[in-house]
Amino acid sequence: MKLRHSLAALLVSATLFGCATSSTPSVNVPLVATQRNAGQIGNVTLTSFDNKTGLNFFISGAPMGVTLPLRLYTFVYKGSCQKPGPVAYSMNEQVNTERQPIRGWTLSRTAPVEMSVLLSGEYSILVRTAPSDGNVDIYCGDIKHGVTTK
């Protein structure tokens, strides 16, 4: 019986070690709330897979008056939050979010571009409310301000 528990512990440890030492780094980009969403915080984690970029968002909230369930639109713009250019990638095939037990919301999107392209250029990520909620920009983050993690 003790051998079985030791084997299980070893297996769990090896799995966690493998996840913690992944060869593909992630990039955490802080999202800054706009004036229309003041006081809220957000973050998006970029990961690379299959020549695409996965974006996993966590936001603490949205402006008062938005309808539930919360629907958010996400975009990658060429340029910075201060000087946005044209939309480079619209990631709105699905716009639903998931409420978290802690105060906040999560959503996941995929951009049809390699993460290295996003990191090498000047791009920003924008989160906007649904058209029925006024198309309000509520978060923005410059990808170049992201922090690489393992």
Image (cartoon, grey):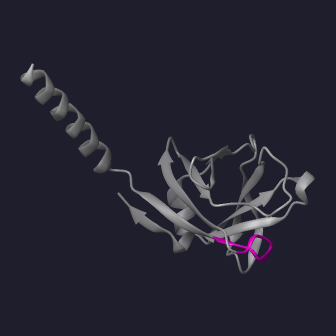
Q: Picture quarter containing residue 10?
A: top left
Could you say where residue 48 lies in the image, as x and y percent from the top left?
A: 48, 49
In the displayed structure, 116 sits above or below 37; it is above
The residue at 54%/66% (across/down) is: 29
The question of residue 36 being in magenta is answered with: yes
**Closer to the camera in the image, 103 or 131:** 103
The residue at 63%/55% (across/down) is: 104
The residue at 76%/72% (across/down) is: 85
Q: Quadrant of the N terminus?
A: top left
In the displayed structure, 36 sits above or below 88; it is below
How many marks on residues?
0
Could you say where residue 74 lies in the image, as x and y percent from the top left?
A: 72, 55
Residue placed furthest toward the top = 1
Q: Judge left or right: residue 86 versus residue 45.
A: right
The residue at 32%/44% (across/down) is: 19
Q: Quadrant of the C terminus?
A: bottom left
Could you say where residue 11 lies in the image, as x and y percent from the top left?
A: 20, 31
Q: Which residues are magenta?
A: 32-38
Could you say where residue 92 lies in the image, as x and y percent from the top left?
A: 75, 46
The question of residue 144 being in magenta is answered with: no
Q: Judge left or right: residue 19 versus residue 103.
A: left
Q: Judge left or right: residue 85 versus residue 19.
A: right
**Closer to the camera in the image, 70 or 56:** 70
